[in-house]
Image: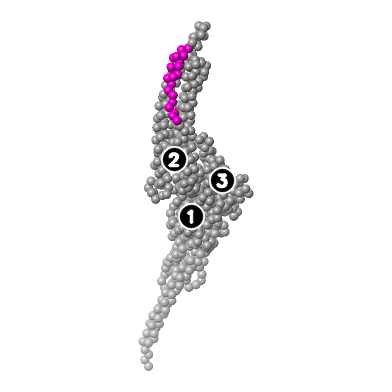
Amino acid sequence: MRKRGEITVFLCLALVSILSLLMGLLESARTAGARLYLTMAADSAAASVMSQYNRELWERYRLLFLEAESEKAIADSFGTFLDYYLEQENLYPMKREETEIAGIVRMEENGGEALEKEILSYIGYRLPEAAADAAGIAREAAQAAKAADFRELLRVCREAGAETKRLEKKRAEAMDVLEDITKLRDGVIRAAERENAGAFRSRAQKLKRKINRFSGCVDGYGKELERLSAHRASVSGDNVFASRPESEAKEPMDRELSAYEQTEKAAAETLSEFRETERRLLAGKADLESALELLEEAENAGDDEADETDPDWDSILALAQGIEAPDIGRREKPDREKMSALDRLEKLLDADLLKTVLPPGTAVSERKVSLQGIPSQRRENGGPPVEPAGQFLIGEYILLSFDSFLEKAQRGQQELLYEQEYILCGRSCDRDNLRETAERLLAIRGAANLLYLLGSPEKRAEAEALAAAVSAGNVPVKFVLTFFVLTLWAFGESVADLRSLFAGGSVPLWKTETTWRTGMESLLSLAFLDFGRDPAGNGETQAEGGFGYGSYFRILLFLENRNVRNFRMMDLIQWNLRKTQADFAVSDCIYEAEMRARVRQRHLFLLKSGYLNTAAATIGY
């Protein structure tokens, strides 16, 4: 029987095709699995890399950052962890060829954006109820920012008042000398009329000295006027309210500058009158010297001829009467007692502020640090703005994680004790940071208090009365000095406020009639220095709902530039962690990195050679 193999051949060919199809399907499935396995391996390796975060940074500040000396160290670490998965015996044979970093985000970049993200991710869980307070702090901060206009007004009024007061003191000094000259001139004439040589000579010499003194007073008045003119030109040129008609401080600033200009014009006229009077007095001084020469010639002639020769008193009297009497008119004299009280007050406010506002016996830290090579010297600007709620929460983190003058948590070794004050001021010394913080608080309180005084007719009337007593009837000067008195009054109340805050008490942001404590009498007598603390030295709470030191600090932090704030936090973190890890640097702290690994894979069910694949993973917190 003859055999045929068509069916066998057909079945063999079909089997080869079916097996090829099955092997192709299996390889396709294996390739997809290998791709997923590689992705899983890359993600796991990335997680393993990030598990090496700095433990001390987490324990102390609850910040998750990977510390790495270089990008190569991160790539090598990622490759090591990835190799563990690639070397397993499984259906996915593959081998890593190279690893590279495609992108990296450090703590310092974008103005410290990564630091902000870490802070917000932590503080939101730590203080979930704090977010509800953000709106209130934002409103108070907006009010405090509004008071910034009055801080500028406060500065200008105080400087203008101080310049005007110095000018008025020189004018009063010159007028006093003119009064003395008038009296001495009359005395010289009476001595000549009585032909009293001794009295004439003595009074004439005094009169010459007074005339010289008047010339010095005129020169001093001219120099003070030059200073005032230069200052007025500078504040007028720097008037920030010229293009901001909506500001509440614009109107009082315009009135102040107008009065300041009128004061300058009136002073220029006075100086011109003084110069003319000086010219006439110097001419009279020459006549007086001629009269003294006549008297001396007569006395010398009497000595030579052995019998006395009477002086030519008619000529001497004519010369003395030729000295023109200064025209000083009828003028009011400034109240010197009140002028001295203002001088004492101004001197006090220019003294060391810490000695004035800190509780008695307070020991101020003198710790210092070097500002060389710190993160804030490499400060970068940029990064998206933080929402008000986030800004507030970052401030809460600062209050929670860093010490201050009043809040000392003793968290361990620290370079500076007043850390919150450093974040605000950035000085190298605890004392300097505390002093500048006190100055900022004084500026906020001074502006708010000035705003209250400007809105109080009774207190403005008191300030005008004092200014009138000091200005001796000079209307433009009176107006300038009225603002000057108001600024000193606001500062006096602010000193009492700071004494409360630094003693642990509270002060309302906006004063009312019931919460205002400093009267005009206590201001001039410096009795307000006894306000702000109770006899036991405890903080005095002025009114329910007042703000304490920490609350005012929240406002200052809320208004602080985010980049400056972030980098000063990095300064403190680096200083403090170097106490236990000498080589720690925030520039080595990685928040996020994008890794790529080139991997060569082999086929199991195909005869093709191996192929390359890329594994990508983003490591971060």
Q: Amino acid at mark 1?
A: Glu
Residue with the mark numbered 3: 357
Return the x and y of residue 214 as percentages of the image width and height. Answer: 46, 27
Q: Are marks 3 and 2 in contact (CB under 8 Å)?
A: no
* N-term-proximal mark, 2 vs 1: 1
* N-term-proximal mark, 3 vs 2: 3
- Can residue 497 be seen here? The reply is yes
What's the mark number on residue 140? Answer: 1
Seen at 49% across and 64% down, the residue is 46
Q: Amino acid at mark 3?
A: Val
Q: Looking at this view, is 326 or 399 the one in front?
A: 326
Cα–Cα gap, marks 3 and 2:
30 Å
- The local secondary structure at tag 3 comes to helix
Mark 3 or 2: the one toward you = 2
Mark 2 or 1: the one toward you = 2
Seen at 49% across and 45% down, the residue is 459
Residue with the mark numbered 2: 479
Cα–Cα gap, marks 2 and 1:
32 Å
Q: Looking at this view, is 341 or 94 the one in front?
A: 341
- Can residue 502 be seen here? The reply is no
Return the x and y of residue 208 as percentages of the image width and height. Answer: 47, 22
Query: Is residue 316 covered in magenta?
Result: yes
The local crowd at label 2, few if under 14, some if 14 to 19, many if 20 or more residues have their Cα within 10 Å, is: many
What's the mark number on residue 188? Answer: none
Provide the residue span drawn in magenta.
311-330
In the rendered image, which quarter contains the N terminus?
A: bottom left
